Amino acid sequence: PAFLQRLSAQFEGTPRLGFNLAPPLLARRDPATGRLLKREYGPWMLTAMRLLARLKFLRGGALDIFGRTEERRMERALIGEYQAMIERVLAGLTPARLADAVALAASVDQIRGFGHVKHANVTKVREAQAQLLAAYEGQAPARVIEIRRAA
């Protein structure tokens, strides 16, 4: 309701709502890239979103159909990877290594987006973390690694 109130305050008349989405269970894939194709959905999607919000209690359970997607499995794996990395970093933490430890811990902040964008960012962050961790543990020369978000 608050979203619709803000819309009516910003626009005159009755604006036509459209949502560009690529739902993993409904979207077709681009034959050339394999990426999910976005499609425009009309205002009825607000009703679908309200229904999904009411079904939030199903998350993480046997009836969580979205939890089985590749992206959700990757997200759950990232949690374990991050915890393992932090434990490794803490095991060797010294005052001199604090800045490097903070950089490693903050590296996950670059994981953003959905679908192929998120996947590309995860790949870049994992590569950067491996190099930063090797340098942190003294196995490789330290180098500055810049992580940029995928387009």
Image (spheres, rainbow, N blue to C red):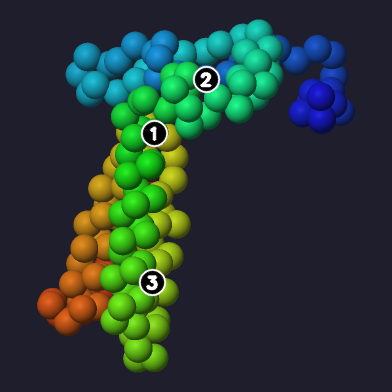
- The quadrant of the rendering that contains the C terminus is top left
Examine the image and state in which quarter residue 37 appears: top left
Position of residue 6 measured from the top left corner of the image (x, y, whole percent): 82, 30
Which residue is identified by label 2?
20
Which residue is identified by label 1?
72
**How far apart are the two marked residues, 3 and 2, measured between alpha carbons?**
35 Å
Q: Residues within 10 Å of mark 1 (few under 14, many from 20)?
A: few
Q: Residues within 10 Å of mark 3 (few under 14, many from 20)?
A: few
30 in relation to 141, above or below? above
Q: Secondary structure at mark 1?
A: helix
Describe residue 70's horizontal placement relative to residue 137 as left or right.
Answer: right
Position of residue 79 measured from the top left corner of the image (x, y, whole percent): 39, 50
Residue at the spot 81% in from the left edge and 24% down from the top edge: 1
Q: In this rendering, does residue 22 appear at all?
A: no
Q: Is label 1 or label 2 in front?
A: 1
Q: Which mark is residue 135?
A: none
**What's the amino acid at mark 1?**
Arg
Q: Which one is in front, 56 or 98?
A: 56
Describe residue 36's horizontal placement relative to residue 13 as left or right.
Answer: left
Which residue is identified by label 3?
103
Position of residue 63 measured from the top left corner of the image (x, y, whole percent): 47, 19
Q: Residues within 10 Å of mark 2 (few under 14, many from 20)?
A: few
Q: Which one is in front, 47 or 143?
A: 47
Q: In this rendering, does residue 93 appear at all?
A: yes
